[in-house]
């Protein structure tokens, strides 16, 4: 019968003198691998146009943003000027405005080739009184026309103002009444607010 051989446990770890050397080798290998990975990532990012274009330079973004803001401000300014100019180019005036520029008066109707014409005395500049003392000066305002509408025996007048030009002056032109039956007519001033103010009477055809 064979004698039993005693089992001896072999060491599974290297000697204590070899451990620092093995650990240092592993750290060095890991460091070299990490450095190589970083270099490869940088090279790939530089060579890939898609990655470089994802993040635009701030130097390019800021001028574009400022240009867009300037365009928006310009558009808003143009819109505001357009609204303001529309109110000046053609605007029906109420009775308070007529009084502030000196009032309104008229003369006897005159027959023309296209019907009866009513001479009107009004000056929207506010530099001379017509029926009252003016309280408002308008250096760039012109009297574009005097609209007239006839309803039965009533003549309605409305001042229309605009911008002063070579063709337009602050002095209001005559109102065109068209062909009217002979007789007496009441003259009423009526502004955009539809408030009516009697300003006299005229006789047509006598």
Image (cartoon, rainbow, N blue to C red):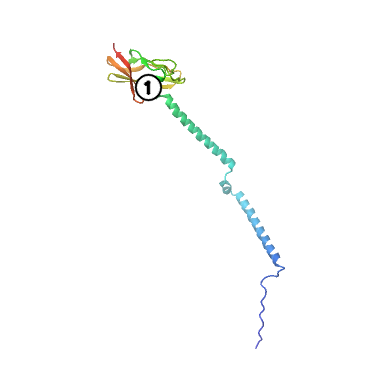
Dividing the picture into quadrants, the one containing residue 13 is bottom right
The residue that mark 1 highlights is 95
Please, what secondary structure does the residue beneath circle 1 have?
helix
Q: Residue at x 55, y 37 (%)?
A: 66
Q: Along the line of sight, which residue is nearer the eye, 169 or 56?
A: 169
Provide residue 202's location: percent of width, then percent of height. Answer: 31, 14
Vertical position of residue 99 compared to residue 4: above or below:
above
Residue extending farthest to the top is: 206
Is residue 179 at least partly visible in the picture? Answer: no
Provide residue 92's location: percent of width, then percent of height. Answer: 38, 24
Q: Residue at x 31, y 15 (%)?
A: 201
Vertical position of residue 35 compared to residue 129: above or below:
below
Q: Residues within 10 Å of mark 1 (few under 14, many from 20)?
A: many
Q: Along the line of sight, which residue is nearer the eye, 88 or 131?
A: 131
Q: Along the line of sight, which residue is nearer the eye, 81 or 202?
A: 202
Dividing the picture into quadrants, the one containing residue 184 is top left
């Amino acid at each position: 019968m064979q004698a039993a051989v005693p089992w001896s446990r072999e060491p599974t770890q290297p000697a204590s003198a070899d451990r620092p050397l093995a650990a240092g080798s592993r750290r060095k290998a890991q460091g070299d691998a990490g450095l190589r990975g970083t270099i490869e990532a940088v090279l790939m990012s530089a060579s890939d146009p898609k990655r470089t274009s994802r993040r635009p330079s701030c130097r390019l973004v800021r001028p574009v943003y400022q240009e867009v803001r300037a365009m928006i401000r310009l558009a808003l300014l143009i819109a505001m000027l357009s609204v303001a100019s529309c109110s000046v180019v053609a605007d029906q005036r109420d009775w308070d405005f007529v009084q502030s520029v000196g009032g309104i008066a008229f003369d006897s109707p005159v027959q023309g080739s296209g019907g009866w014409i009513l001479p009107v005395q009004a000056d929207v500049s506010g530099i001379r009184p017509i029926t009252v003392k003016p309280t408002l000066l308008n250096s760039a305002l012109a009297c574009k026309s005097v609209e007239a509408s006839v309803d039965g025996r009533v003549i309605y007048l409305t001042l229309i103002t605009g911008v002063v030009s070579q063709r337009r002056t602050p002095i209001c032109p005559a109102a065109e009444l068209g062909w009217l039956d002979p007789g007496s007519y009441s003259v009423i001033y009526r502004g955009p607010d539809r408030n009516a103010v009697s300003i006299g009477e005229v006789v047509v055809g006598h």
